[in-house]
Image: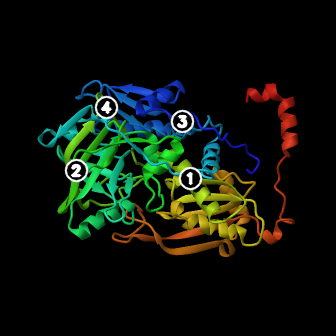
Amino acid sequence: MDDATPLAASRVQPYADLREFIDRCEAAGELVRMKGVDWDLEMGALAEIVNHKRPEAPALLFEDIPGYPAGMRVLSGATNSSKRLAITLGFPEPSHPLDVVRAYRDRMQTHRPLPPREVETGPIFEVIDRDDEVNVLKFPVPRLHEEDGGRYIGTHDYVIMRDPEQDWVNAGAYRVMVHDEKSVGLWMSPGKQGRQIRQKYTDRGQPCPVLICVGMDPLLFLASGNELRFGLSEYDYAGGHRGLPFDTVKSELYGLPMPAHAEIVLEGEITLGDERMEGPFGEFTGYYASEPSEQPVVRIRRVYSRRDPILTMASPMRPPSDFSFSKCVMKAGMIWDEVERAGLSGVTGVWCHEAGAARLFNVIAIKQAYGGHSKQAAMLAANCQSGSYLGRFTVVVDHDVDPSDMFDVMWAMCTRCDPIEDIDFIRKAWSGPLDPRLPRGVTTSSRAVIDACRPFERIKDFPKVARASPELLKAVEAKFETILKRI
């Protein structure tokens, strides 16, 4: 693992907006256009069929949606492959998923947040519906799963709020259910930064202004869907990856920063005591884990959009989903970066497995240098900001094990881990209602930390792995190349 070649450090010229991103994906053979797909269940079912069919499935662009103007489209799976992630982050084309993880880790050595640039106008102002004109169902909002409580306009989204105390802008990926033409329900898990900000307005007895962006640069979605440190705006983080600041425009009602090149943005507010039943919703763990509950309502007073807008969609389900792969890559890169920033050396790879919904089964590979090194790595990976929420299993393996290969990882666990000696537990760690294993009302869970490395004191005399040397394999493959190509 430690001799793999990372991507070059160069940054590809960023695309201008979601439309240019789609063009680049299509040119790379990473997009399939589908016509005549109904918003009611068919989009969600197709996302499941395609993403369960093969790893790193293409993005789907739904066009000519029945009952809606021909120009309106829905995009599923924007970043859910190595190539599309590379396009999003500005990396050269990768040959292996871990190439993107390494490239992310390498960039974070020099990454600097880049605040957005406020401009006077942008394409998002092409169409504006105000007050009585508002109708969020003028867009082809999907009902994704058969047991869902309604249509969800916010899945692949960017929910923007301003902290009233510290005056910084946060953006999170929270689910947004349509109640009616002018109101939506906003569900945020306990502990999430958006929920903390909302509580500050509640404590002051003030309405909480909200922007809900549901069609935008996929880089913003990647930023909003991951745990950044409190106080770091997702705009700034994403701008640092883009290498150029995002252009923003002020919203009409509250002056919140909207992406100037977004496709659709809803503006409204949450008022104390204004709640309605939200859910159920099939979530990324693969379950209807959070039961229907009273959740805050956002009363929508402005709808901004481009002409012929594109709604972005992420369909949570039993993994793999149309966003779970991209979540694995980003989460792995962030854990790797945070572990090294904490002072740990020797990390050769990190991977968060789709079977664990990119959170529940995480693996870190290291080249051991001292006694306790492997335990330190596992504990850091389990407890860092990016690895702590809704975790379950954290495994540390030696550098000769590919952390992205589940068979390889299980082999290491079966042959190098003694259950009594090498498995530890963390109690009362950060979790939430989307964990199907938790009793109702409980928001903490335990973790298993598994050391699947060779014992450090036995590294020199631990039994050798029974396999051919790289030199022998290369020579034999060359000699029998013609025959091997037919196998």
Q: Amino acid at mark 3?
A: Ile
**SS assignment at label 3:** helix
Q: Please tell me the numbered disc located at residue 309.
A: 4
Q: Which residue is mark 1?
A: 353
Answer with mark 4 or mark 1, whichever residue precedes in sequence: 4
Q: Residue at x 44, y 37 (%)?
A: 49
The residue shown at (26%, 59%) is 292
Residue tagged by mark 3? 87
Mark 4 and mark 1: span between their CA atoms? 34 Å
Q: Earlier in the sequence, mark 1 or mark 3?
A: 3
**Identity of the amino acid at label 1?**
His
Depth check, mark 4 against mark 2: the one in front is: 2
Compared with 130, 467 (above or below) is below
Q: Is residue 26 visible?
A: yes
x and y, in percent, of residue 306 in the image: 30, 32
Sort mark 2 into few (<14), some (14-19) or many (20+) by Cα contacts within 10 Å: many
Q: Earlier in the sequence, mark 4 or mark 2?
A: 2
Q: Residues within 10 Å of mark 3 (few under 14, many from 20)?
A: many
